[in-house]
Amino acid sequence: GESVGLHLPTLSVQEGDNSIINCAYSNSASDYFIWYKQESGKGPQFIIDIRSNMDKRQGQRVTVLLNKTVKHLSLQIAATQPGDSAVYFCAETGGGADGLTFGKGTHLIIQP
Amino acid sequence: NAGVTQTPKFQVLKTGQSMTLQCAQDMNHNSMYWYRQDPGMGLRLIYYSASEGTTDKGEVPNGYNVSRLNKREFSLRLESAAPSQTSVYFCASSEFRPVQGTNEKLFFGSGTQLSVL
C-alpha cells in the first residue's frame, strides 16, 4: 500500500507464489491508472494500465483491479520470479496536462 | 529507438553552483515532464510541458527553471543549487492529447543522480 514518512512498505513473498500490491488513491475524478515497476538505479517502467470504465485488466502474469467505489487499485503478479524484485508505484490522472500523480511505492522482495 | 535520454547520469555540485539537466525523446511525444524522486517520497512533478512552446509549474517548482527547446528536448536548470535539491531527477514524455484530454502512459529516462554539497 501507500507509505507514510520515509519508509516504503515492504511485501516479501516466496518465489513462485502470487503477489498482491495495493494502492489507495484520493482523487475521485481520476480516470486513468497505471502501475510502474522500478528496479534499483533505473527509471520507472510501465507494467499495465486501466481506465475507469473497466474494473479488471490482464497482461502477461499481471492483473490490475480497480474498485472506484472505495478508490482502490491493486496489482496481482502471478508466479512471482526473482526478476520481479523492485519497487512498484501506482499512478493516477484525471486527464489534465500535468501528467500522473504517483503513490510512494511498495518494495517487493522475492524470497528463494 | 532510444526512448527518453537524460544527461548526465551523475553530478556533484557545490551549493550555489548552477547546472542544466538535458532530456531528449525520440517518440514524437507532445508532452514532457521533469520529476524528482526522494527516498520514501515517490515521484514529485517539478515542471511539465504539455506541448512545444508551453511550460507549467508542477508540485515542487521552486529553485528550478525549464526550457522546451523544441518538440524533442526539455531541459531543467538549477540556477543556484541547494542541498535540498539533492535527489534523483527523471525526465518523462507522453502522448498527451490536450483536445481529447486523455492521458497516456509516461515513458521515463534512466535518471540523473544529483548531489549538492
Image (cartoon, coloured by chain):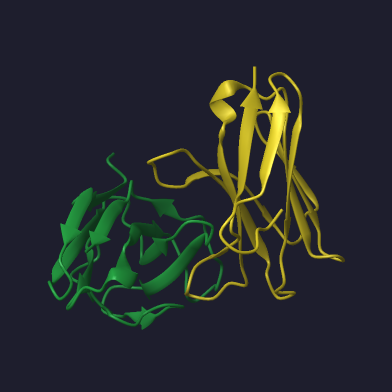
Instruction: Name the residue rendered at 72%, 18% in the picture.
Output: A16
Residue A19 visible (yes or no) = yes
Q: Quadrant of the C terminus of chain B?
A: bottom left
Q: Is residue A53 left or right of residue A42?
A: right
Q: Nearer the viewer, residue A44 or B53?
A: A44
Judge whether A18 appears above or below B45 on screen. Answer: above
**Chain in yellow in the render:** A
**Residue at figure coordinates x 31%, y 63% from the top left:** B86
Residue B84 figure quarter: bottom left
Q: Is residue A68 left or right of residue B107?
A: right
Q: Position of residue A10 (x, y in %)?
A: 66, 43
Q: Position of residue A31 (x, y in %)?
A: 68, 67
Q: Foreground: A15 or B105?
A: A15
Q: Nearer the viewer, residue A5 or A19?
A: A5
Residue pictured at 58% horizontal, 72% vertical: A95
Q: Residue at x 66, y 49 (%)?
A: A9
User: Which chain appears green?
Assistant: B
